[in-house]
Structures are given as C-alpha cells and as structure tokens.
Image: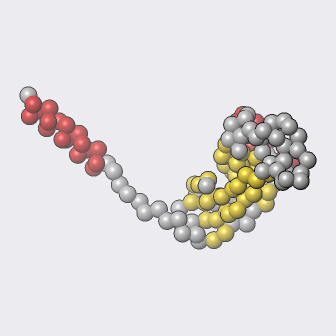
Amino acid sequence: MKKYILAILCMSILCLFAGCSTEKISTEKLRDIEFTVIPNKDIPEELKTMIEEKGEEPFKLTYADDGTLYIAVGYGQQPTSGYSIKVTELYETENAIYIHTNLIGPAKDEKILERATYPYIVVKTEFIDKYVVFE
C-alpha cells in the first residue's frame, strides 16, 4: 500500500513539472514612448468611472480606446493637499511596456490644506498591444 501511495505521489509531481515551461523575459529598453499627461476633463468617461470605483485605494489601470492607450496610476489617500505624481520613465521592451512613477510630496514653502487628497495621474500614448508593467 505504501508503494502504491508513493508511486501516485511521484507521478503527480512529475505531471506538475511536465506542464511548466520557461520564457525568456527581456527587460532591455527598445525605445522610450512619447506620452501626454492629460487633465481630468480629457479622461474618457469609462476610465473616469474605473478610477472613481477605486475610491481611496491605490490603483494601476490601463484603458485602450480607438488606437490610444491610457495608463493611470493612483497613490491612494494622502493626508494633505500638495502631492503630485511624476512619470520618470515610459518605455517599451520586447515583451512589455514599463512605466515608472514617483509620488512627490508638498514643497516646504507650499501652502497645504489639512484634508485628505487622492492623487493620480493619467497618461495618453499610442496603443501598443503589450502588457503594462508598473514600477
């Protein structure tokens, strides 16, 4: 009986490994992607709805419409006003599009309001049929 259970266990493990495959994922930059940060009034309604549904939580979204790709990044609730987001890189690799953003806090000399804010950024670029990796 022990041999039977051991044989089934070994066969199960072999079946699991037989289904695995590896694919080389290249993160080498092919090119920078041109983009535009768009104001709230120019965000497509469907994307606005998706952003609003996220509420106070951080989010990372993509939305494609008519040959255009929109990438949205939100940092969730912040304790005061004065926060902004900077896109430090947006580039294409063989397998994906990479976007790097930074949350920038209020400047020391900036007037801030003591109320919660929910900073986010939406960028518009050409449609590229690849996964978007948020970093």
25 relative position to 108: left or right:
left
Query: x and y percent of residue 109 in the render?
Result: 89, 53
Viewer-proximal residue among 82 and 75: 82
Q: Quick check: 40 above or below 77? A: below
Q: Quick check: 55 above or below 92? A: above
116 relative position to 72: left or right:
right
Query: x and y percent of residue 28 in the render?
Result: 54, 69
Viewer-proximal residue among 47 and 3: 3
Farthest right residue in view: 111
Query: x and y percent of residue 58 in the render?
Result: 68, 41
Say which residue appears at 71% left-offset and 49% top-offset. Answer: 72
Say which residue appears at 88% left-offset and 40% top-offset. Answer: 113
Quadrant (top left, top right, bottom left, bottom right) of the C terminus: bottom right
Quadrant (top left, top right, bottom left, bottom right) of the N terminus: top left
Query: x and y percent of residue 19 in the render?
Result: 31, 48
Place residue 94 in its image quadrant: bottom right
Is residue 66 visible to the viewer in this orientation of the structure?
Answer: no
Viewer-proximal residue among 99 and 97: 99
Place residue 46 in its image quadrant: top right
Say which residue appears at 70% left-offset and 55% top-offset. Answer: 102
Say which residue appears at 13% left-offset and 38% top-offset. Answer: 7
